[in-house]
Image (spheres, rainbow, N blue to C red):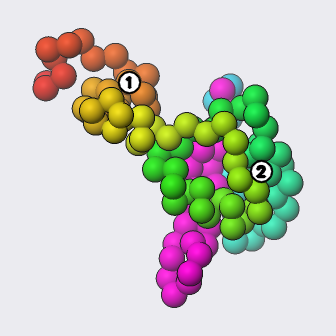
């Protein structure tokens, strides 16, 4: 899941686009500037059996709470996970892209 927003002369971020990818490869785009029916997005954000994966979740969380009036559950932040793992590039690639780098070759 990814959220695109801007903060120009506003206290809260204004969400422009929410992107959601599901395991079968389907991608959903929510144009929040032209669409205001977010029941499906709220349901997804609150579904405890679905892990929502973000990168840099703190700002996305603030924006989603403002837009949908709910606090998402069962979220995973790849940026935070990479920081816990030492923030090595090969760890980030493994977490975010599923790329396995052989130890000793990570500097190539």
Location of residue 42 with respect to 89 vertically, above or below: below
**Foreground residue, 71 or 102?**
71
Residue 19 screen position, x and y as percent? 62, 49
**Neighbour tally class for label 1: few under 14, some 14-19, many 20 plus, Cα within 10 Å:** few
Question: Is residue 84 visible in this depiction of the protein?
Answer: yes
Q: Secondary structure at mark 1?
A: helix
Residue 22 lies in the magenta stretch: yes
* Residue 83 falls left or right of residue 57: left
Q: Which residue is mark 1?
A: 94
Location of residue 94 with respect to 43 vertically, above or below: above
* Residue at figure coordinates x 60%, y 62% from the top left: 62
Disc 1 to disc 2, C-alpha distance = 28 Å
Upstream in sequence: badge 1 or badge 2:
2
* Residue 7 falls left or right of residue 74: left
Q: Which residue is mark 2?
A: 41
Residue 25 lies in the magenta stretch: no
Question: Is residue 32 visible in this depiction of the protein?
Answer: no
Q: Secondary structure at mark 2?
A: helix
Residue 38 screen position, x and y as percent? 81, 58
Report the residue that reaches farthest toward the bottom: 9
* Residue at figure coordinates x 56%, y 57% from the top left: 60
* Residue 64 falls left or right of residue 106: right
| Image quadrant occupied by the N terminus | top right
Residue 13 screen position, x and y as percent? 57, 72
Report the residue that reaches farthest toward the front: 84
| Image quadrant occupied by the C terminus | top left
**Neighbour tally class for label 2: few under 14, some 14-19, many 20 plus, Cα within 10 Å:** some
* Residue at figure coordinates x 61%, y 39% from the top left: 75
In the image, which residues are magenta?
A: 1-23
Residue 48 screen position, x and y as percent? 76, 34
Number of numbered labels in the structure image = 2
For residue 67, what is the image quadrant? bottom right
């Amino acid at each position: 899941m990814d959220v695109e927003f801007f903060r120009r002369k506003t206290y809260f971020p204004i969400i422009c686009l929410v992107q959601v990818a599901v395991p079968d490869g389907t991608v959903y785009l929510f144009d929040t500037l032209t669409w205001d029916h977010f029941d499906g997005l709220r349901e997804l954000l609150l579904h405890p059996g679905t892990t929502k994966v973000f990168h840099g979740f703190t700002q996305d969380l603030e924006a989603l709470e403002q837009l949908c009036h709910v606090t998402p559950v069962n979220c995973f932040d790849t940026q935070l996970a990479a920081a816990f793992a030492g923030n090595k590039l090969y760890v980030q690639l493994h977490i975010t892209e599923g790329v396995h780098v052989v130890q000793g070759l990570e500097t190539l």
